[in-house]
Image (cartoon, rainbow, N blue to C red):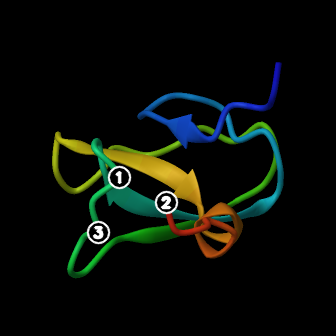
Amino acid sequence: MGEQTEFREGDKAPNNGIYIEVGETGSNVEFPEQVELKAGESFPEPSNQDRIWKNKRDLSRQRPQK
């Protein structure tokens, strides 16, 4: 089983990194909040209740679906 990639308020960051808001369905957000967290720190409340946190690094690795 792989590492969790989507996080909600209060979840703990698994790694150091920059995390960015995305829509729950994976949709892009026009002006997303970004936070820099260290491993073990809690995720803050997103600016919209329908958003989740993802590692910015993971967003750049996504491949287009066929």
Residue 42 in the image: state x and y as whole percent: 59, 38
Of tags 1 and 2, the one toward the viewer is 2
The image shows residue 14, relative to residue 47, as above or below, that is above
Spatial CA span between label 3 and label 2? 16 Å
Q: Amino acid at mark 2?
A: Gln
Looking at the image, residue 27 sits to the left or right of residue 13; the answer is left
Q: Position of residue 45 (x, y in %)?
A: 33, 44
Q: Residue shown at 42%/34% (left/top)? A: 9
- Asked whether, in this view, residue 38 is left or right of residue 65, the answer is right
Which residue corresponds to the image point at 29% horizontal and 69% vertical from the top-left?
Answer: 28
Mark number displayed over residue 26 = 1
Residue 5, given in percent of the width and then of the height, sits at 63, 41
Determine which quarter of the picture holds residue 11.
top right
Q: CA distance from mark 3 to mark 1?
A: 7 Å
Q: Amino acid at mark 3?
A: Asn
Which quadrant: the N terminus?
Answer: top right
Report helix, strand or loop for mark 3. loop
* Residue denoted by label 2: 65
Q: Nearer the viewer, mark 3 or mark 2?
A: 2
Q: CA distance from mark 1 to mark 2?
A: 13 Å
The answer to which of marks 3 and 2 sits earlier in the sequence is 3
